[in-house]
Image (spheres, rainbow, N blue to C red):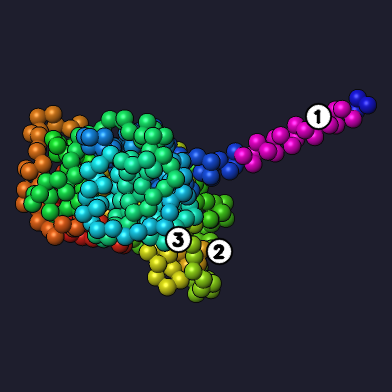
Amino acid sequence: MKNKVQNAVIALLSATAILLFVLTAVSERGLFFSPASTDGTQNESGSTGPLMPVAAVLNDGDCSLLGKNRLLTPYFEVVRPILVELLGSANAPAQVDPARWVAALNGKGVLLDYGAVLPVAVIGGSEEGPLTELYADSLLITLTKELAELYLYADGVCYMSTTALKTADLEPRLLGSEGEAVVYACTLGKTGTALTPHSAVPIAAQAAGVLTRTPLCDENGSYERERQMILLEAFGFDSYTARSYADASSGRVFLAEGGTLRAGGDGSLTFVAADEAAVAAMLGDSAACVDRASAILADCIAGLTNVPRYVLSAVETQGDRTIASFDAWYDGVVLVATNGSRTAARFVFQGDLLVQAEVALFAVSVSETDAAAPQLNPQALLAGLTGDGSSGRLSWAYLERGNVWQAAFCVLPVVRGGNGADIHG
């Protein structure tokens, strides 16, 4: 009898150990939680739920912008499950006049700004419902009626849908956080016509600060042993069997059965799958492809600090291919290269298989903001900007100027495909 009890205890302990091992392995893959970002908050890369926006505007009579990671991230953790319920309970959408969008903006509610036109299926994390076939660059939750309404805006077209959630239940949870005081561009008359109606314009702002980018590798594309193993495994390579050689362009190329991975001295990673023509020609699910790309990015930067947040900026389909592009953001500010490109990572899927990828990996550091920098009012901030009323959104950005990245305000295009080169500084 004693032996039977001992055997049962041993079996139970073994099963528990196996379960803990499995749970640990799953959590390390980012399926339970996301890695920490630069400021101690959670990074969205690898998340399979609703997509975190680049900014949120809370309107309870006065508009308040949550655009910094340390403000936006904890707030969106509260909003995320609410957004799932809103999308799941939404009625069939109806197209409404753009003037209705402007009126809704000026009422009580919360604007989630994604900064790029994306499929609602991706924004909502594959949540089923009548809105999933639409596209949006901003989503507005209005709290002016008994039931909350959802407004979706993209390319000057607006849709509205009534949900089953009561505003009396949502208002205490969605409003109340404090951020930077802003106004919507649609309230500024002619001075705001270069912007989308929902672009948030600071009432007072200081444009100063310099950012430094530093590759995570040396000039020959070599990483510390542990980081090299992490990067190889992120792209499906066996870190113990992958062969490598130094190429003529100061980079290192890794070879495996699944393809090649080149690590450049500038911190770039370039992946090309082997025998691409053999990939089955089947249309992949865009939301699943985005999740896969986010998981790879999360693996690449796992355990690192002072690295950018990779924000989805475009999801494109070309025949049987899905292309997911990501911007690089640091503490709520996007990095824009001299040529106007914001793309820091790009993944190409054929069906559900990754066939190409390009990722820029770097650490960032920001100098202290100059406290003596003069404050700008909305009119001064928008002076000299021209546009047709739908050209883009006003945003903080680090613009590449020579060997440094200078903080400034600029108008970033909001288009499908996401990375236009027209930057008005």
CA distance for labels 1 and 2: 44 Å
Q: Is residue 243 above or below residue 277?
A: above
Residue at position x 10%, y 41% in the image? 378
Q: CA distance from mark 1 to mark 3?
A: 47 Å
Residue 29 is situated, as x and y percent measured from the top left of the image, at 53, 45
Residue 9 bears which disc, if any? 1
Identified by mark 2, the residue type is Glu
Q: How many marks?
A: 3
Residue at image coords 36%, 34%: 171
Q: Secondary structure at mark 3?
A: helix
* Location of residue 93 in the rendering, given as x and y in whole percent from the top left corner: 38, 57
Residue 190 belongs to the span the image colors magenta? no
| Vertical side of 280 occupied by 172: above or below | above
Q: Which mark is residue 286?
A: 3
Say what amino acid the circle numbered 1 marks: Val
Q: Secondary structure at mark 2?
A: loop
User: What is the quadrant of residue 170 in the picture?
Assistant: top left
Quarter of the rendering containing residue 268: bottom left
> Which residue is under mark 2?
257
Q: Which residues are magenta?
A: 4-23
